[in-house]
Amino acid sequence: MPVDAYNLVSTYTSFGKALKTEIVEGEAKMCKAIDDLIEITLAEGEAKGKIKGKIEGKIEESNKNIAEMRTAITNTLSLLGKISEKLQETINKQTSFSVLIKWLQIATRAESIEQFEKNII
């Protein structure tokens, strides 16, 4: 590609900044630029994949912790009596870990399931 054309394209796109195009005898060697673009794109994809994997791992860990907290609340309350389906559903629908921690604290101090229910509303 003629250098003038290359300079025009690189001025109006981000390619000029991202790619190291070799200029030989007044011509921009686009094969090198395309190879660089492919390399940059692959590197960006790999980085995004790593980030996505880390996020998915954190979400999975968080979901596991929430499930364990729900189980702890249910087990604690079962020592006080039979848990109604409505209360079990309320516990199972809760997705906030901080709320579940508070509920577990309330459950450990409650003298009855009814007292627990009144304190979480």
Image: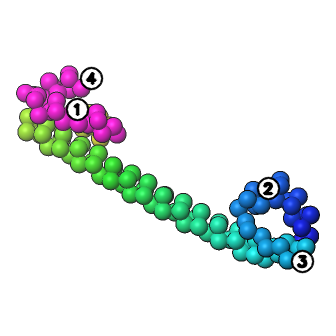
Quadrant (top left/top right/bottom left/bottom right) for the C terminus: top left
* Among the 4 quarters of the image, the one containing residue 75: top left
- Neighbourhood count class around disc 1 (C-alpha, 10 Å): few under 14, some 14–19, many 20 upward: few
Q: Which residue is mark 4?
A: 121
Q: Magenta span has 105? A: yes
Tag nearer the camera, 4 or 1: 1
Q: CA distance from mark 3 to mark 4?
A: 78 Å
In percent of width and height, residue 37 lies at: 70, 68
Secondary structure of the residue carrying numbered label 1: helix
Identify the magenta region. Answer: 95-121
Question: What is the three-letter code of the residue carrying label 4?
Answer: Ile
Q: Residue visible at 44% across and 54% down?
A: 55
Question: What is the three-letter code of the residue carrying label 1?
Answer: Lys
Q: Which residue is mark 2?
A: 13
Secondary structure of the residue carrying numbered label 2: loop
In the image: residue 12, left or right of residue 5: left
Q: Is residue 28 visible?
A: yes
In percent of width and height, residue 64 lies at: 29, 52
In percent of width and height, residue 41 lies at: 65, 66
C-beta proximity under 8 Å, tags 1 and 3: no
Up/down of 32 relative to 117, above or below: below
Question: 116 or 45, which is in the foreground?
Answer: 45
Tag nearer the camera, 3 or 4: 3
